[in-house]
Image (tube, rainbow, N blue to C red):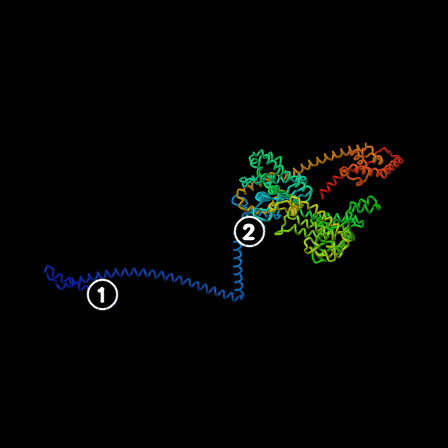
Amino acid sequence: MVNASKGQKARQNSANLLTQKRLECRSNGSGSPVTPRQQFLMDRLAATEQTAKKHKKHATNLASENMVLKENNQSLVESVDNLSRKLHNKSCQANHAKITSEELRQELRCSKHAHTIQAGRLRHRKETSIEKALKEARVGIDKRWMKGKRGIFTEKSREMVRDLVSMSVAPANVDRVVHAAGAGLGINVQNHISAQHVGRIVEEGGIASDLQVTGEMHASKAYTISGDGTTVRHINYEAKNVTMYLAGSNVPTTRVLDIMSAPNHTSEEQMTGWKGMMYQTLTGTYNVLPLGQGAPINPDEFITFLKGVGSDHAPDQQKFVQEYLPEIARANHEKIQAAGGMDAWMALPEEEKRRQDVQVHGDLCMSFGQKEWVNLSAEQRMEAEALVWCGCCMHKEMNSVKGGVRAMTLFWESIGGPGPIKLMNKANSAAAANSAKGSAAETHAAEVSEGGAVKLTSLVGAVFNHKDDKKGQQETFKSYFEEFLGYRVSCPDTSNTRFQSHCNCAIFIILYLPQILKFMSHILYSKQKVSLNHMEANILAGLKDIPTLTKLAVLALYSLAVSYVYMRVVRATGKHLQNALDLGPLHVKVIAFCESIAENTDLLLAPDASYVTGTLDGKQWEHPDVFYAVHALLPSLPLRAFMIGAANKWKDFSSEFSPEGPITRLSPAARAKIYINPTNDVNEGALGCLRRAICEAIRLSLRHHNAKSKYAINNTRAFLRSKAVTEAVRIWLRTEARKQIDSGQEKKRRKELVMLEKIAVEEKQQKEAERKLLARQRQVELDNLVPLLDTTWIQANHKQIKNNKILKQINWHRQFTEKGVIPMKTLVTQMRKDDKVIQLIVAINQYNQDILPRLEAISQAAIESGIDSSVEMPIEQSWEEEEELEDADMLDDY
């Protein structure tokens, strides 16, 4: 319809155009008439042209539309192709899904558990994958390197190494311990460390500890020192420590120093050791440090901060304090005054000061000049010169027990009754058994043998808890008591040197006496041959001896009444910590209490005795069961004698607290700056740790042991973490540690000990040769001496005899008399002349009445038998010098 309408319009337009042409021809100027045919042709032509144009235009439009249609058709074809492909894919997927579903249905129909099994497998795979991923993540992330960027072990690694060594990990095992611990925590530790490098790191800790202690001592301006010694495998070792109040703290702090070896334990060697410690190890090391170079410490001023000394009561320790330290202070004070005061002294050249320091050691008043010293008040001078000494309280208590035991022994001798049985060793027991009653051999065996409570506790400790694990009955003893009591008990360790061990063992025996007797029977019948060895037989005899049990009971009561209370005070910790300088009233109280018990023993022995009046502090008994066990025995106890002996020893060993002593005269200001440990436990513990370390590691060097001990005890870890330890200080520590180890000081120390011991041996050999020569000369003199044997003549003419001649006559008689008849030579020498004459007359009477008849009988027998009587008879050498040396040795041991 649209095309028809368009054709009609085209024909109408062609007709209109032909009409218009015809009119134009009629009106043109040719004037020629137009025929109808022409006109028709012309109109027809015009219409044809018009139609041609229209068709041409229409063809163009159709071509355009055709192109658009072709393009649309192409896009439609492509769309159809895409849809066909998608349809094909969907169809394939549908077919595949259909096939898969069919297969699954088939599988499910074949197995009812197929789905469950598959789900379990999927769940397991999921969990395994997650765990594996987490594990890989941990291992991949937790990697640790002990070394830093420059190949140097980090500070955390060094701290870890020092901590491990302080916990007794051997240097050779440190690397394995680190890697084993890392593997256990899922950490992959990188790098390795050798035992040699471990030793250097530990040495760094030891040097750092010296720097730490030096700085703390210098900042405190007041410190006290303490020392003790022991022998390990024939080598003398000296332990040292310092105690002070740290800056900003009111709690005393004790720092341990190096344990040093020494050729002997004399006060001179102790002084040498302290000089080396103060001038070389402490201030010498500090001043070469980068920190010390900026603010060096004057060693002469450093020694003035020493305010007190704590030690045991050995004579060498007291000599060290009473003679050497005051002499050092006096000499150095004179040195300052001679220089013109402090300013003048500091202005002297270093060479001159060092030259004078060689002659005098230490300084007490170095911080004051001559002018300032004169202007000080008496109290200020006393504070500046304050140097006090205080003995170990545990040694005081130990010696009080010794004094009480000695007093009990004298008590048994004085009453003349049967005392504790002698617990002879095997040799003496055989000698006494095989000798005639009253013979010299039997008497000698009894004299050299011991008995009583302390001897019995020593034997009990040796059998029931021997210090050697391979000896004794300790495990059998513990198991037996566990079966009997329901729990294991240990016998007090009297086999080792332990404070209070003998009193504790006395308590143990009193408390478990029936069980111990049954255990002795168990030992008897548990052996293949039914018998007890000699030591076990002695124990059984002592346990059945009433006087011995009596002494044990006294030891137990003394422990309950005095020892435990005293130890609780002197060994208090925390807020109850005691300063030894403040214990004077306590010792006065102890002495008064012992004397009160001696005056009225019913305070402990009466049936209604109570802890209120029976203990030092009036508090409950430490072991009430022991108190009642003693009262169940209640023999006639020599308690009064024991308390008197203990009180006397308390007086002897508390002399530093006398009213006129330096401790009492201290001003409150000076006392507030000084702290001395009440006991010597720090030194005793340090030496004990050294002994155990040497036994466990035979090749342990003293330097390595000191380094790890100081680092652990002095809390050097915190010091190394502080800001004072800069990177420059750490570099210096690493360098210094390497120098110290490579210097071979340990080998030099051992070599020096050998040389000093050789020198000491040569000196003793020379002295022994001189002594023997002197003895021969004296013997020749005695052989040529004409003895005076007429007592009447001596009594009439003794004033004309010189003292020297009387002494020679006494020495001549000393050759023939038994030991003890004539007093020692030192005592005779100090006697008045009349007393010497009396001793000579006594010796002559014994010679004439006893010795001379025996000599004549021997001579007559020799003549009758044909022996030449001119041959000299051997005479026993019994010189007083040897006796005095023996007594001195016993005093040192005591």
Name the image quarter holding the N terminus: bottom left
Of 839 and 55, which appears nearest the observer?
839
Q: Where is residue 463 in the image (x, y as percent from the top left)?
A: 73, 50
Q: What crowding class fits label 2: few (fewer than 14 Cα within 10 Å), some (14-19), or many (20 or more)?
A: some
Of 275 and 29, which appears nearest the observer?
275
Answer with left or right where residue 234 lies relative to residue 844.
Answer: left
Residue 527 against residue 204 in the figure, above or below: below
Tag of residue 187: 2
Q: What element carries label 2?
A: loop
Residue at (44, 63) in percent of width and height: 93
Tag of residue 118: none
Tell me where residue 608 sits by quadrant: bottom right
Q: How many labels does the image show?
A: 2
| Circle nearer the N terminus (1, 2) | 1
Report, in whole angstroms, how far the alpha carbon at label 1 lies from the one at label 2.
98 Å
Tell me where residue 526 sits by quadrant: bottom right
Tag of residue 7: 1
Q: Position of residue 869 (x, y in %)?
A: 86, 34
Q: What crowding class fits label 1: few (fewer than 14 Cα within 10 Å), some (14-19), or many (20 or more)?
A: few
Residue type at tag 1: Gly
Residue 623 against residue 450 in the figure, above or below: below
Name the image quarter holding the C terminus: top right
Q: What element carries label 1?
A: helix
Answer with left or right where residue 502 lies relative to residue 74.
Answer: right
Answer with left or right where residue 126 lies relative to residue 782.
Answer: left
Of 209 and 580, which appears nearest the observer?
580
Residue type at tag 2: Ile
Answer with left or right where residue 841 lies relative to residue 367.
Answer: right
Q: Evaluate whether residue 436 shows in this view.
A: yes
